[in-house]
Image (spheres, rainbow, N blue to C red):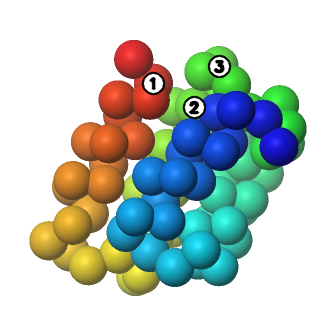
Amino acid sequence: MGGTYEQVRDVLVRYVSPAVADATLQVACRRANATPAELSAQHLEGVLQEISHGIRLFCPAEKHGEMMLALAKLAE
């Protein structure tokens, strides 16, 4: 897997289980037309948007904003 993929995954597993993080990230990559290996800053905005929608059921509401801020920092 690529470095960006691992960085995003590392943030996600702080808020949800590894299984949920992996499944959500893989779906988000597919919907953003990127493979996990080629995930880069070019795809990150679309992937983060997909993650935000897909992970709401699994991430506690009070932590969702914190998680999204941590993910947004990766796109800087």
Rendered residue at 52%/79% (across/down): 17
Horizontal side, residue 29 vs residue 24: left or right: right
Q: CA distance from mark 1 to mark 3?
A: 9 Å
Q: Position of residue 56 (x, y in %)?
A: 37, 73
Q: Position of residue 72 (x, y in %)?
A: 36, 34
SS at circle 3: helix
Q: Residue at x 49, y 44 (%)?
A: 48
Q: Amino acid at mark 3?
A: Gln
Neighbour tally class for label 1: few under 14, some 14-19, many 20 plus, Cα within 10 Å: some
Location of residue 27 (image quadrant): bottom right
Task: Tell me whether the residue at label 3 lies in contact with that at label 2, contact meaning CB atoms closer than 8 angstroms.
Answer: yes
Per the image, the residue denoted by label 3 is 42
Q: Quadrant of the N terminus?
A: top right
| Secondary structure type for disc 2 | helix
**Which of labels 1 and 3 is toward the front?**
1
The quarter of the image holding the C terminus is: top left
Q: Relative to the observer, which residue lies in front, 15 or 25?
A: 15
Residue 44: assigned label: 2
Q: Which mark is residue 75?
A: 1
Evaluate if marks 1 and 2 touch, with contact meaning CB atoms under 8 Å apart. yes
Q: How many numbered discs?
A: 3
Task: Using residue 42 as the reference point, say whether residue 12 is left or right of it.
Answer: left
Front-lying residue, 64 or 2:
2
Instruction: Tell me where residue 12 appears, x and y as whole percent.
Output: 47, 59
What is the three-letter code of the residue carrying label 1?
Answer: Ala
Residue drawn at x 51%, y 31% is 45
Task: Give the vertical position of 35 relative to 42 (above or below).
Answer: below
Residue density around tag 2, few if under 14, some if 14–19, many if 20 or more, within 10 Å: many
Q: Is residue 29 left or right of residue 65?
A: right
Q: Is residue 52 above or below residue 20?
A: above
